[in-house]
Image (cartoon, helix red, strand yellow):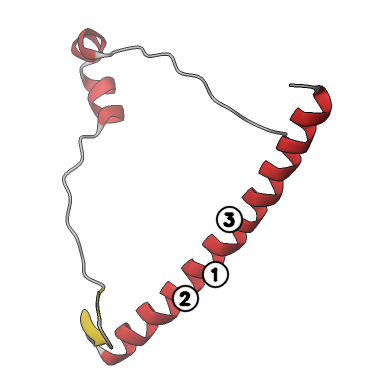
């Protein structure tokens, strides 16, 4: 593949990423509007045509690795797995 081909592909990637970012922003804006309406109505579920929409509190349990590391650094080190991966970036 020539430098010209790679440049064209990178330009296309950047253009598509911009569109994806714009779509993501629009999606989030629409979600925020629906969530605001649900909050105003005081509901956590509603039916909109054939769609069922829910906006509920979710409780999760997460392990506090930072705190654990501070309190039990020796045990933490025994269970840490170092991994290597590749990251693709365009700047």
Quote the CA–CA distance across marks 1 and 3: 10 Å
- On the image, the x and y values in percent for residue 1 come to 73, 21
* Nearer to the camera, 24 or 15: 15
Query: Mark 1 vs mark 3: which is more N-terminal?
Result: 3
Q: Distance between the residues labelled 3 and 2?
A: 15 Å
The answer to which of 54 and 72 lies nearer the viewer is: 54
Q: In which quarter of the image is residue 83?
A: top left
C-alpha separation, residue under disc 1 versus residue under disc 2: 6 Å
Mark linked to residue 58: none
* Residue at numbered disc 1: 26
Q: In the image, is 27 to the left or to the right of 48?
A: right
User: Within 10 angstroms of label 2, few (less than 14), some, or many (20 or more) residues?
Assistant: few
Residue at x 78%, y 37% (from the top left corner):
8
Residue in the image at 27% along x and 14% along y: 80
Q: Residue 30 carries which label?
A: 2
- Give the x, y percent position of residue 76: 23, 15
Q: Nearer the viewer, mark 3 or mark 2?
A: 3
């Amino acid at each position: 593949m020539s430098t010209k081909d790679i440049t064209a592909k990178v330009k296309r990637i950047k253009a598509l990423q911009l569109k994806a970012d714009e779509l993501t922003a629009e999606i989030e804006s629409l979600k925020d509007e629906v969530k605001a309406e649900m909050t105003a109505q005081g509901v956590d579920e509603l039916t909109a045509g054939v769609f069922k929409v829910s906006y509920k509190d979710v409780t999760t349990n997460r392990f506090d690795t930072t705190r654990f590391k501070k309190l039990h650094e020796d045990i933490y080190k025994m269970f840490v797995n170092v991994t290597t991966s590749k990251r693709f970036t365009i700047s």
